[in-house]
Amino acid sequence: MWDDAADSPDPSVAEHVRRYLATDGRDGYLEGGVTNLVLTVKGRKSGRWLRTGLFFGEDDGRYVLVASGSAITHTHPAWYLNVVANPEVGVQILGERFTARARTAEGPERERLWRMMTELAPVYRTYEARSRRQIPVVVLERAFGAAGLRERTT
C-alpha cells in the first residue's frame, strides 16, 4: 500500500504529497495553516492504491477529515467515495505510518466534529455555504493487531 500508491491527479496535491513523503512531513505537515496527513485509499473501481494530502484534526485519539472537495464541488471527492467502498486505509502523519478504519460521522457526532473542523479550517464554512450537499466528516480509527499495522518510517 505504501510504496505502490499513485499520487493524486491534481498536480498541486501530488506535489504536496511528494514533499510530505520526502521529508516525513517536515515540509507539508502544516500546509495552509492546518495540520495535514497523507491518506492512502484503495480505488473502488481500479483496485489500485491512491494517495492524497488532507487537512486533519484530532479527537480523543482519532483523526478527523472533511470530504469537502473544493468550494464549487457539488459531488463528494473521489477519496471519500473510495473510503466508503474500502474503509481500510493507510495514514501517514509526519514520519509515522499506520492503518486505520474510516467511517462517516453522523448525527450529533458529525455536528460536533464539523464545528471542530471549521474552527481549525474556517474555509470549510465557505465550502458549506456554496455546496448543495452535506459535506461528510470522516473519522479514522487506528487499527491494531498482530500483523504489525503500525510502522515508523526512517
Image: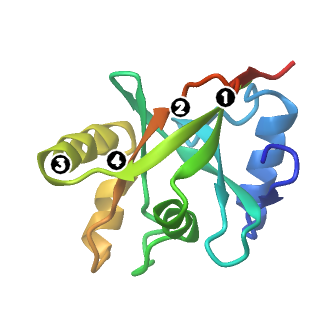
Question: Which residue lies under the disc numbered 2?
Answer: 143
Look at the numbered disc 4 and give the secondary structure of its residue.
loop
Which of the marked residues, 3 or 4, is nearer the chain's N terminus? 3
Q: Quadrant of residue 60?
A: top left
Contact? badges 3 and 2 (CB < 8 Å): no
149 relative to 64 in the view: left or right? right
Q: Residue at x 39, y 51 (%)?
A: 103
Report the amino acid beneath label 2.
Ala
Looking at the image, tell me whether mark 1 or mark 3 is earlier in sequence order.
3
Quarter occupied by the C terminus: top right
The label nearer to you, 4 versus 2, is 2
Tell me if I can see residue 151 in this picture.
yes
Say left or right for 46 vs 112.
right
In the image, which is nearer the foreground, mark 4 or mark 1?
1
Mark 3, mark 2: which one is toward the viewer? 2
Quarter-of-image position of residue 22: top right
Point out residue 76 in the picture as x, y percentages from the top left corner: 44, 73
Q: Amino acid at mark 3?
A: Glu
Q: Give the mark nearest the N terminus, 4 or 1.
A: 4
Query: Do the residues under discs 1 and 2 have CB atoms within 8 angstroms?
Result: yes
Marks 1 and 3, Cα distance to the nearest angstrom? 30 Å
Q: Residue at x 66, y 68 (%)?
A: 43
Specify few, some or many for label 2: CA neighbours under 10 Å numbering under 14, 14-19, or 20 or more.
Answer: some
Q: Looking at the picture, which amino acid does disc 4 mark? A: Pro
Mark closer to the observer (3, 4)? 3
Q: Which residue is mark 3?
A: 111
**Tag 1 residue:** 149
